[in-house]
């Protein structure tokens, strides 16, 4: 008798990012359907949250709890350095206990936001290298990628990808980026973001309501010197846009995609102090989808806020921080309704929003049709994983 499969899931999960957790939930749902007897364990950034929310066995991603905090003195430097050595042993031991490990989506090969090579990229490299060392297959499934401008980060990400047994990407530019960084992508496929596999709820829609997805946006790696300036400009322009909606008598619902974004919600609500503005209370992507289904139109920054709006076939405007937003919007038929979060043109934003609303019926139909195709493609990927990666037996 073949023992139950032992499947590991790995990533910055339970750490406050709704998009990451949504991708995880999509794969977890697939596994529970296709491998209901599997022993699933998770190595993640928020083990307590994942354990309590999903009832799974969890292991902390890092030995040192302050891994992702800025060093505050010599002791923290020593602890971080020692933690790198401990994590190499811990990761290999955890991987050895699995028959297969899946990294469920997320931008794990990206460096579009501030990122240090010895943070999560190093953790991902340990995972892939451990898989090779102990004979456990590691799959990077529908992940995002870009060409890092930093040499060390680029090298760490390249080797983390090279050592994985299976790779698929959530868009063509991600695969192109890995090719440009020296990874052989001949057998790698492109499939949609995993969050498209989540069910789409349907709630009563509040007339004339607008959903605004905000982000604590400070620019990218190259913008560290002016991060504060970028943040203030972004918040000022988003606040101005919301003020215009309120002046027109429009109900506004504010959404976040990460715990860090709540500070932007608080600033907007303090500044405008209007009964027409409400903040959606969401801690999972499913809750975000449910809350977002109650608005007519969405303007959003975070990638998975945009994706949720498109999943719900909402007329959507993206104020993106990376090319992945534009790629997603173009794929779903809304490529003309994009701006950069770093350089928002307020007058153009008002014009784009007016056009988006005037064509709402037409655009919603296009998005719904293309969204159904994203779901079909994900079903195809899950079938490929079952056939090639998950018929697990004793090693």
Image: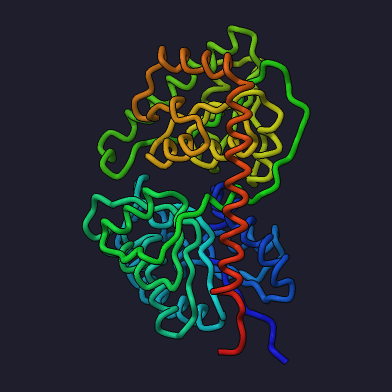
Place residue 279 in its image quadrant: top right
Q: Is residue 64 above or below residue 298?
A: below
How many marks do you count on the picture?
0
Query: Which quadrant of the figure has residue 201?
Result: top right
In the displayed image of the protein, which residue is found farthest to the bottom? Answer: 1
User: Image height check: is 171 above or below 335?
Assistant: below
Judged from this view, the residue extending furthest toward the right is: 204
Q: Is residue 266 visible?
A: no
In front of the other: 113 or 104: 104
- Considering only vertical position in the picture, is 367 above or below 343? below
Q: Residue at x 32, y 35 (%)?
A: 227
Residue 362 placement, left or right of 234: right
Residue 215 x, y percent position in the rendering:
48, 35
Give left or right: position of 315 versus 224.
right
Q: Residue at position x 53%, y 72% from top?
A: 101
Q: Position of residue 116 (x, y in %)?
A: 32, 55
Q: Quadrant of the C terminus?
A: bottom right
* Residue extending farthest left: 151
Residue at left offset 52%, top offset 36%: 332
Left or right of 67 on screen, residue 372: right
Q: Quadrant of the N terminus?
A: bottom right
**Rendered location of residue 170, percent (x, y):** 47, 51
| In-front residue for pair 200/176 | 176
Colouring rule applied to residues: rainbow
Res. 287 visible in picture: yes
């Amino acid at each position: 008798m073949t023992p139950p499969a032992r499947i590991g899931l790995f990533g910055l999960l339970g750490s406050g990012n709704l998009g990451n957790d949504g991708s995880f939930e999509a794969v977890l749902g697939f596994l529970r359907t296709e491998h209901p007897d599997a022993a699933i364990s998770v190595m993640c950034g928020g083990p307590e949250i994942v354990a309590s929310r999903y009832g799974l066995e969890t292991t902390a991603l890092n030995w040192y709890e302050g891994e992702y905090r800025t060093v505050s003195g010599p002791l923290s430097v020593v602890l971080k350095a020692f933690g790198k050595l401990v994590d190499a042993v811990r990761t290999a031991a955890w991987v050895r206990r699995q028959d297969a490990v899946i990294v469920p989506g997320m931008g794990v090969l990206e460096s579009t936001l501030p990122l240090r090579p010895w943070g999560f990229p190093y953790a991902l490299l340990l995972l892939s290298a451990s898989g090779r060392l102990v004979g456990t297959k590691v799959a990077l499934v529908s992940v995002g990628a870009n060409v890092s401008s930093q040499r060390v980060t680029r090298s760490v990400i390249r080797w983390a990808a090279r050592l994985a047994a299976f790779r698929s990407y959530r868009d063509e530019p991600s695969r192109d980026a890995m090719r440009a960084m020296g990874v052989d992508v001949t057998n790698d496929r492109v499939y949609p973001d995993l969050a498209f596999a989540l069910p789409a709820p349907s709630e009563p829609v509040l007339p004339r309501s607008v959903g605004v997805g905000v982000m604590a946006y400070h620019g990218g790696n190259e913008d560290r010197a002016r991060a504060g300036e970028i943040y203030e400009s972004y918040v000022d322009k988003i606040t101005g846009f919301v003020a215009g909606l309120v002046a027109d008598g429009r109900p506004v619902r504010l959404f976040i995609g990460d715990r860090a974004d709540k500070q932007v919600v608080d600033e907007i609500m303090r500044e405008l102090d209007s009964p027409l503005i409400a903040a959606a209370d969401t801690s999972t992507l499913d809750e975000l989808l449910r809350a977002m289904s109650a608005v007519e139109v969405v303007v959003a920054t975070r990638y998975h806020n945009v994706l949720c709006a498109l999943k719900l076939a909402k007329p959507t405007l993206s104020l993106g921080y990376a090319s992945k937003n534009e790629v997603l919007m173009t794929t779903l038929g809304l490529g003309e309704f994009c701006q950069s979060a770093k350089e928002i043109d307020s007058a153009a934003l008002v014009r784009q929003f007016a056009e988006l609303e005037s064509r709402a019926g037409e655009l919603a139909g296009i998005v719904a049709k293309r969204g159904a195709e994203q779901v079909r493609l994900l079903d195809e990927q899950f079938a490929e994983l079952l056939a090639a990666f998950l018929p697990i037996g004793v090693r």
